[in-house]
Amino acid sequence: MTRSATLGLLGFLGLFGLLGAGIGGVVGYRIAREQEPAPIVAGEPPAARRARLDAESLERELRRVQLADVATSEDPLVVDTFPVTFRDEISIERDHEPGADPADLVPMRERIAELEAEVARLTEIVRTGDERKQRIKRLIAKEPLRHGELYLELFERAMDGEAIALDPTPMLPLLLRLVDETGVAAAPIEDEARRVKPEPRIEDTWVTLRTWTDEIHDDPERAPVTFDDQLELSSTIRLPHDAEEWQGDDLELSIELSFGTGSDSGYSFFLQLSGPSSYGGQDSCVRLEWMPGRTLVERAPVRGGEESRALALGEFDALRRETELLLARLRSRLR
């Protein structure tokens, strides 16, 4: 073999090696992208989160199976349904791999059909919400309620107790809406509180708003901490009962929200939500205190239990600003 022919052959082999490395890099990149963890959606309910992750996992598996199917297909129309880059990769692979027996592809195509059906089912769950939410929607639709849309949003949020314990911020606008839509801030004061029953057809649904001054003696060796302005919002929302939809406890949500501001610059925030345990919901509780010389966070459920500890420097500062803004807006409604 002449020197020029040898150099030509080596050059061809080098080019072929670069082409193979490029294809491997593209395939490796696509696999890595497919295996990236799914992003976390803030405020997403657990059932929807699980369904979304299952759907995404099945979609990745479905894509891998489809690629394997197309790579061994002898039908050019099948290959043409994929993007040009995939068709190029498949054509290269086909040039170097023997074709598969079409009979071997039957179970694979059946698996593809099963995966497509499962992805469609899980996608629909993510889109419409889980069955508990659908039941609440039906209950609200059966009874003409003045504030049905607001109740639905409150119940949906309350179902994920751990999400509220970790970050109650999404609940705050809904609680302000509860005050504004029911008009409790403008109700007359009776027994030191403003109280309304926003649903004439449901006697056990009510909203109360009150303010008072209190003294708390946490430490007998220290002077009492005087809270100049305590504000409390409490409510019970009971949905219409329908035995065809639900035979367990009445679907009822209890809300307690309170703030305390002290003359010594102390500040506290407390939120508790309670519902029927038989409905599969989670009660949640968040307490934050910034007092002279000490801080506190208590919340549950957190990883299946309770958390109680001192706050780190700067921790929950953003949440404190949001709660103080809500307190200022509630006070303005009472003027």
Image (cartoon, rainbow, N blue to C red):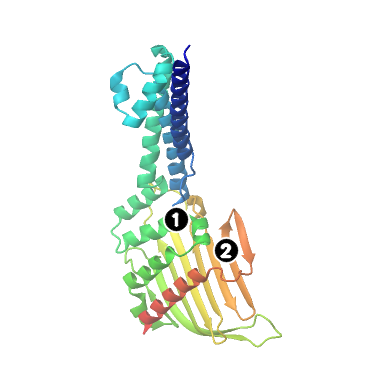
In this figure, which residue is indicated by the disc labeled 1? 42
Along the polypeptide, which appears first: circle 1 or circle 2? 1
Q: Nearer the viewer, residue 67 or 12?
A: 12
Rate crowding at label 2 as few (under 14), some (14 to 19) or many (20 or more) other CA atoms within 10 Å: many
Above or below for 52 versus 70: below
Q: Residue 175: in sight, yes or no? A: yes
Q: Is residue 101 found left or right of 145 in the rendered image?
A: right
Kind of residue indicated by mark 2: Arg
x, y percent for residue 191? 44, 82
Figure quadrant of residue 116 = top left
x, y percent for residue 59? 41, 35
Identity of the residue furthest to the right in this view: 221
Q: Residue at x 63, y 86 (%)?
A: 224
Secondary-structure class at tag 1:
loop
Count of numbered tags: 2
Mark number for residue 299?
A: 2
Rate crowding at label 1 as few (under 14), some (14 to 19) or many (20 or more) other CA atoms within 10 Å: few
Distance in Å between CA atoms under marks 1 and 2: 18 Å
Q: Nearer the viewer, residue 69 or 183?
A: 69
Above or below for 322 versus 123: below
x, y percent for residue 190? 41, 82
Q: Are marks 1 and 2 in contact (CB under 8 Å)?
A: no
Above or below for 304 versus 191: above
Kind of residue indicated by mark 1: Ala
Mark number for residue 10?
A: none
Q: Is residue 121 found left or right of 228 in the rendered image?
A: left
Viewer-nearest of discs 1 and 2: 1
